[in-house]
Amino acid sequence: MQDDTRVLAGECTIRDGTEPSGRRGDVVVVSKPDGTVLVHDAEGYQPVAWLTRAETVTFVDGVLTATDGGQFLRVEVHETYGNDSYPTAPAGMPVGDCPDCGGRLVRDDGTVTCLDCRTAYGFPRDATILTEAADCDCGCPRMRVRRGRAFEVCLDRDCESLGEAVCGAFDREWDCPACNGDLRVLRRGGLLAGCEHYPDCDTGWGIPVGTVVDDCDCGLPVFETPNGNRCLDSGCSEADAEPAQQP
Ligand SMILES: [Zn+2]
Ligand SMILES: [Zn+2]
Ligand SMILES: [Zn+2]
Ligand SMILES: [Zn+2]
């Protein structure tokens, strides 16, 4: 997928499923790299016609055609006022400068992306990206993530690993309630606290988003999470905290 957005202005006829006979006027057509096509006329924020994330978009002989399943949008350009493509990128909050090229880093829900070289760093959705004053020595922004306690690590996993930090803090810290073995911190997609005697003992739970604030009567830690306090064991009956959903 290319990152350019086509912007086309002209006198056009627009046809789609709702107006097959077509509307004609001076419009601006925006065709985004994800296949979304918007046709704007002179008024309002809403396009007069659009197709979101179309499967195919072609522009041949002055006709832009977007199709998606049984839906279509066709724009015939009779007179062109302007037609060009421009680079576009996710618009996010600026969070610092790229350690590789000095370009501006911006964040959206789960990714920090350099606007120049397009280097991207994924981060957990619950992470807080720290201000530039807290940048890592490597030049990358750092994030704060709660996994038992608050950890501050570099966004670049090759520089600092959240898993290793959590492991260093909590590996063998808690006892398995089933066999009294140590709970190891394991990476299985997310972070797990799992019994060292696996597969003989398959006790284990995902480490919740939150910080340890107490000990449960069952011996495991209690986490303060965005959904209330809960035992590491999501099914623990000893937990006297308010019922909490899995984050
Ligand atoms: Zn860069
Ligand atoms: Zn770093
Ligand atoms: Zn065990
Ligand atoms: Zn418990």
Image: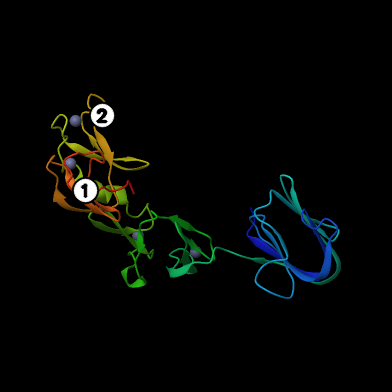
Q: Name the residue type under label 1.
A: Gly
Contact check, label 1 and label 2, Cβ < 8 Å: no
Helix, strand or loop at label 2? It is loop
Q: Name the residue type under label 2.
A: Asp
206 sits left or right of 59 in the view: left
**Please, which residue is most extreme toward the bottom here?**
42
Residue 11 seen by the camera: no
Helix, strand or loop at label 1? It is helix
The answer to whether the beta carbon of the residue marked 2 is less than 8 Å from any atom of ligand 3 is yes
* Residue 28: quarter of image: bottom right
Q: What residue is pinned by disc 1?
A: 168
Q: Residue at x 24, y 46 (%)?
A: 167
Image location (x, y in percent) of residue 42: 74, 75
Q: CA distance from mark 1 to mark 2?
A: 22 Å
User: What crowding class fits label 1: few (fewer than 14 Cα within 10 Å), some (14-19), or many (20 or more)?
Assistant: few
The answer to whether the beta carbon of the residue marked 1 is less than 8 Å from any atom of ligand 2 is no
118 sits left or right of 67 in the view: left
- Whichever of labels 1 and 2 marks the residue nearer the N terminus, that label is 1
Residue sitting nearer the eye, 130 or 207: 207
* Image position of 45 with respect to 227: above or below: below
Q: Which mark is residue 29?
A: none
User: What crowding class fits label 2: few (fewer than 14 Cα within 10 Å), some (14-19), or many (20 or more)?
Assistant: few
Q: Tell me the mark number nearer the camera, choosing from 1 and 2.
A: 2
